[in-house]
Image (cartoon, grey):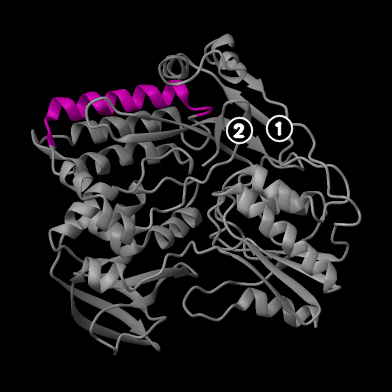
Amino acid sequence: MIRLLKKKPVMKNQYILTIFLFTLFSLHSRAQQSEKKFGQNEIIEDLDYLYTSLKDAHYNIYAYTSKEDFSKNYQNVKESILKDSVTLLQATTIFQKVISAVNNGHTEIDFPGASYRAYAYSGGTIFPLEIAFENNKSLIRKNFSNNSKITIGSEIISINGVLMKDILAKIYPQVSAERTYFKNAKIEMYSFPRLYWQVFGKQDNFQIKIISNGTLKNYSIDAINLIEGYEMKRTEVLNAKMKLEFIDKSAYINPGNFSGDEQKYRKFIDSAFVEIKNNNSKNLIIDLRNNAGGNDSFSDYLVSYFANKPFKWNSEFTLKTSQFLKEHTRKHNDTTDAYFQTILAHKNGEIYNYEFDEYPPQSKQKRFNGEVYVLVNRQSHSQSAVTASQIQDYKFGTVVGEETGDFPSLFASQFQYTLPNTKIGVKVSKGQIVRVNGIKKPEGVKPDIIIKDYLLDEEDEILKGLLKKLN
């Protein structure tokens, strides 16, 4: 997530998934709250509030959709609300269909975690196959079913008689993203079984058609227990952790997500570059794959260890103030603070620039002076994608891997509020960030060296491919 806090704009990750095992077992009271139901009028009031606030507060709501399409979608969703008793899960699903139509990854309503926890505590079950998207195909990435004949890499054609393309057409409106490539990356990230449950509900058995080794096959598989059969066995796609190792003449560093304990992070970076210097490494490989992003103060500190001149993490950072944002600021922020005073001082709808100071590089004695390579994939989110573009644009290093799902020039700077009746959280982009080279083209970070990353196996194609080139 990219959000402004007090005096300095920082880029916070909007994608760090709550560790599901922790939340499942520690937030039982919230799970109980998710069972509350709302009347039709309450849902429509919240829907109208969401629609009006998005138009007022978003930096450029019609950047990736037309006014006509956005309005038509809202009306269609509104007309579909016929029940007078709506669960929190149903309400979340309804509102996501409106906010996702903005087609902006940082303007979103989160996955309904409280409802998911309530379902888990009730002994809920879930679809047992995770998927990854490769060449426009839905391929089996993990098999948690009791049928070992279903092989990894097989393509799922249909589930319970519904083609995968039609299943995805129903899941996509729950996922905020600028394009299908990024929606698919987010489905991989959140996990297909979780989103399938949100849209299609509890199902005890699944009739699946798959193509395996060129042959069409049919299987009947049972749902598995959500906690013991799924959450306790899987690992999240976003798994960046601080790590340093030396491979031949190269130093490999994974800085972890750009968030958390900043003092601990800086100590790790400091000590890592001392070791790299002592090891006389020729190459530095920075791994930003499967990275949730975070705060520019973290990423800039890393970059300062190999930058050869002062730098910024963007070429332009602009914000839009609005009546809605001002009202929110007066209620929830310290209006004596200079940053929040600028929000109140500008006219409603006005877009204004926020300047950043240049960040200084480390001293020559501390800096790494060899070749720098940055690994990225479609799961390099938020600040990790922006950092990769920053390194690329300044020519501080060479980017290696596959195109990121997230854009390095994007609408972000989230601010958050809740809908009045359901209290569902809403995140809206009130700013625009432009990458260092000034290009606003809606695309991910494109690597200088393209190496495809396959999520179907444990093999590290990108790192191995780069090391092969270097050696």
337 on left or right of 420? right
The residue located at (71%, 71%) in the rendering is: 252
Find the magenta span and give its range.
37-60
Identify the element where label 2 is drawn: strand
Residue positioned 49% across, 73% down in the render:
455
Residue at x 46%, y 50% (from the top left corner): 15
Query: Can you tell which quarter of the image residue 163 is in?
Result: bottom left
Residue 389: image location, x then y, percent: 70, 51
Residue holding disc 1: 316
Q: Earlier in the sequence, mark 1 or mark 2?
A: 1
Q: Is residue 2 left or right of residue 361?
A: left
Find residue 85 and report its image quarter.
Answer: top left
Which residue is farthest right?
A: 364
Asked if marks 1 and 2 touch (Cβ < 8 Å), the reply is: yes
Is residue 256 part of the magenta span, yes or no? no
Residue 446 seen in this snapshot: no
Q: Which residue is mark 2?
A: 432
Amino acid type at circle 1 is Glu
Q: Marks 1/2: CA distance?
A: 8 Å
Using the image as rendered, state which of residue 50 and residue 16 is in the foreground: 16
| Residue 45 in picture, x, y percent from top left | 22, 23
